[in-house]
């Protein structure tokens, strides 16, 4: 299946058009296009978010660099920061929002981590977690990251060859200690979900993280037949 992200003409690819001020922040938006061969109709994307501590809370956000000294210096330092995060990303363009600039980079060849460690600072996060839940497991996602997609919802979706937006999958975490793995698997058709990873995501209990592509929406909520204690809201 052919699909695109970001959709054409959403980003400016000419960095000479960046008109920054001393109030500007440069956000590094690294994304990966995901596509499962046996799930032919459901491509999706994930963004690499950075964990930092605000007070006693861990918050995820796009990595960023505040304007300093000059535009040239700020772009050079932003680029240095980018390459400390990931190797050989492809610059896709930027989107300006007030005085801020969201710099988009694609990186499609990464290996999903099997286990998160306590000192991990970078996490691949789905669009559902960013725009619907505003959380990645126990970590809140910073408003500046969520707000960008609320302001520009055309960045939420992948698009098919006829320029139609493709629905995003939802994410559900299942606790293996409390729930039967086989019973969970039976709730969904085999070609409508896949297991993103298996990890000690809260560092104590064992979780499995599901991307679910085929779900039923009733009254603006998502329901599952045997596990409807886990009702998730969805924002259209």
Image (spheres, rainbow, N blue to C red):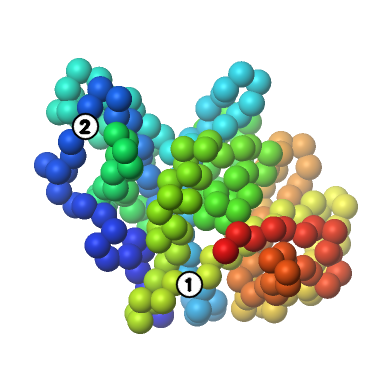
Query: Is residue 159 visible in this depiction of the protein?
Result: yes
Q: Residue furthest left?
A: 16
Which residue occupies 29% across, 48% down? 95
Residue located beneath label 1 in the image: 166
Residue 155, located in which quarter of the rendered image? bottom left
Looking at the rendered structure, the secondary structure element under dot 1 is strand
Across and down, in percent, residue 93 comes to 24, 51
Question: Viewed as shown, does residue 220 lie left or right of 149?
Answer: right
* Residue 27 % position (x, y): 36, 37
The first of marks 1 and 2 along the sequence is 2
The reply, left or right, for residue 17 in relation to residue 231 is left
* Residue that numbered label 2 is attached to: 20
Query: Is residue 84 at all visible to an observer of this figure?
Result: no
Q: From this view, report whether residue 125 is shown above or below residue 216.
A: above
Q: Give the position of the N terminus as an image quadrant.
A: bottom left
- Nearer to us in this view, 120 or 233: 233
Label 2 neighbour load within 10 Å: few <14, some 14-19, many 20+ = some
Tell me where residue 100 appears, x and y as whole percent: 32, 36
Residue at the location (43% across, 46% down)?
148
Where disc 2 sits, the SS reads: loop
- Which mark identifies residue 108? none
User: Does 62 sit above or below residue 1?
Assistant: above
Which of the pair 13/175 is nearer the observer? 13
CA distance separating discs 1 and 2 = 34 Å
Quadrant in the rendering for residue 65: top left
Q: Residue at x 36, y 63 (%)?
A: 5
Residue displayed at 33% across by 42% down: 97
């Amino acid at each position: 299946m052919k699909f695109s992200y970001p959709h054409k003409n959403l980003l400016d690819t000419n960095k000479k058009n960046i008109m920054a001020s001393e109030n500007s922040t440069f956000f590094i938006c690294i994304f990966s296009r995901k596509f499962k061969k046996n799930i032919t109709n459901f491509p999706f994307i994930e963004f690499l978010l950075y964990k930092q501590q605000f007070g006693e809370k861990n918050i995820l956000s796009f990595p960023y660099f505040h304007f300093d000294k000059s535009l040239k210096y700020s772009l050079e330092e932003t680029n240095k920061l980018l390459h400390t995060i990931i190797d050989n990303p492809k610059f896709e363009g930027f989107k300006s929002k007030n005085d801020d600039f969201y710099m988009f980079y694609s990186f499609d060849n990464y290996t999903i981590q099997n286990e998160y460690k306590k000192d991990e600072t970078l996490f691949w996060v789905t669009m559902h977690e960013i725009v619907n839940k505003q959380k990645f497991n126990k970590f809140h996602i910073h408003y500046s990251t969520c707000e960008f997609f609320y302001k520009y919802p055309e960045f939420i979706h992948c698009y098919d060859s006829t320029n139609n937006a493709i629905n995003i999958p939802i994410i559900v975490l299942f606790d293996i200690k409390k729930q039967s793995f086989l019973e969970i698997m039976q709730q969904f058709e085999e070609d409508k979900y896949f297991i993103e990873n298996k990890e000690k995501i809260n560092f104590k209990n064992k979780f499995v993280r599901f991307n679910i592509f085929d779900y039923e929406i009733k009254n603006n909520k998502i329901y599952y037949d045997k596990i409807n204690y886990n009702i998730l809201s969805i924002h259209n």
